[in-house]
Image: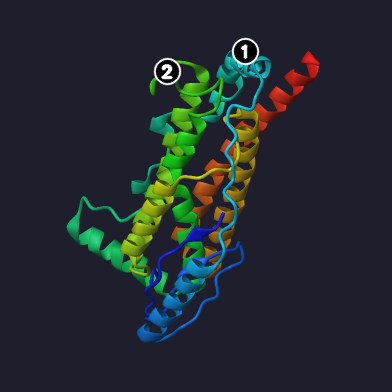
Amino acid sequence: MAMKMNTNIFQSPKYPSFSLPAVITSLRPPKLFTATSSSIRSRSNEVEMKVKNSPRSPCHVQITHSMPPHKIEIFKAMESWVEDNVLVHLKPVENCWQPHDFLPNPASSDEFHNQVKELRERAKEIPDDYFVVLVGNMITEEALPTYQTSFNTFDGVRDETGASPTPWAKWIRAWTAEENRHGDLLNKYLYLSGRVDMRQVEKTIQYLIGSGTDVRIENNPYRGFIYTSFQERATFFAHGKTAKHAMRHGDVKLAKICSTIASDEKRHETAYTKIVENYSRLIQTKQ
């Protein structure tokens, strides 16, 4: 999915004028460059004009409710199985880590300032291209409202009231609550690091959530859970890689942050994979 990004997101102590191109239109890594502010504005305007003048592709016609009723009934019939086999992949809130566990403690003013100073000293040793990836990971996590909205369009499993007692609804809410910690933690770390222009990042998140997304799930829970299984695997790899590179750059605490998030993603991937496998088994027995 192409994403419009804001320029001048990154502020580097080594390269103060470091920025991203105005628009990223492919999955290839953005080219990193240093330039004066005037040349950045010139490049941004040039890219914007090219986008405005380029021919628009035909709009995708959205398809809704593509799953036949008899298949929806299979998902509804899986509720007791979900209770026993999916909800077990959630952790009790009291046993869960929280962003506070990994960040400077604001309870003590002196201790807080010293810990922030240490965090920033470690962050100085990390190259700019690492922060490009870390911001991308954080923005992906911060789009969580879009993902929960998508789940609640799935026929047969949606949370009909916002507080439904069904196992499917319990999973959707609790999974969202666990995932919510990821964006919170990365957002606060990046804010404290002083390495990025957080206002530009925050604008990008607002644009992303406001725009929504259509990955052509068609209200179909089978398509939705397959997509989510792969998304969880992708984020597991993404956070795992940033953990390895943070360790390579000498920031053990940042490595712990990323590896902890990766562990959550792997646990969630396991749950979604089990859902897809069980539905596939059931649908075969009905044929």
Residue occupying the point 60% across, 36% down: 217
Q: Which residue is mark 2?
A: 164
Cα distance, mark 2 to mark 1? 16 Å
Residue occupying the point 63% across, 14% down: 73
Amino acid type of the residue tagged 1 in the rendering:
Ala
Residue occupying the point 59% across, 26% down: 65
Mark 2 or mark 1: whose residue is earlier in sequence = 1
Compared to residue 38, the image places residue 208 above or below, namely: above
Circle 1: is it few (<14), some (14-19), or many (20+) Cα within 10 Å? few
Residue occupying the point 39% across, 53% down: 207
Res. 102 in view: no
Find residue 31 and report its horizontal and vertical position in percent. Answer: 55, 75
Compared to residue 131, the image places residue 69 above or below, namely: above
- Compare residues 279 and 268 and report the one nearer the observer: 279
Compared to residue 178, the image places residue 14 above or below, namely: below
Res. 61 in view: yes
Quarter of the figure with residue 165:
top left
Find residue 271 and report its horizontal and vertical position in percent. Answer: 61, 31
Horizontal side of 69 relative to 95 (left or right) equals: right
Amino acid type of the residue tagged 2 in the rendering:
Ser
Circle 2: is it few (<14), some (14-19), or many (20+) Cα within 10 Å? few
Secondary structure category for the residue under label 1: helix
Find residue 269 and report its horizontal and vertical position in percent. Answer: 61, 38
Quarter holding the N terminus is: bottom right
- Compare residues 22 and 231 and report the one nearer the observer: 22
- Compare residues 152 and 47 and report the one nearer the observer: 47
Name the disc covering residue 77, or none: 1
Horizontal side of 143 relative to 1 (left or right) equals: left
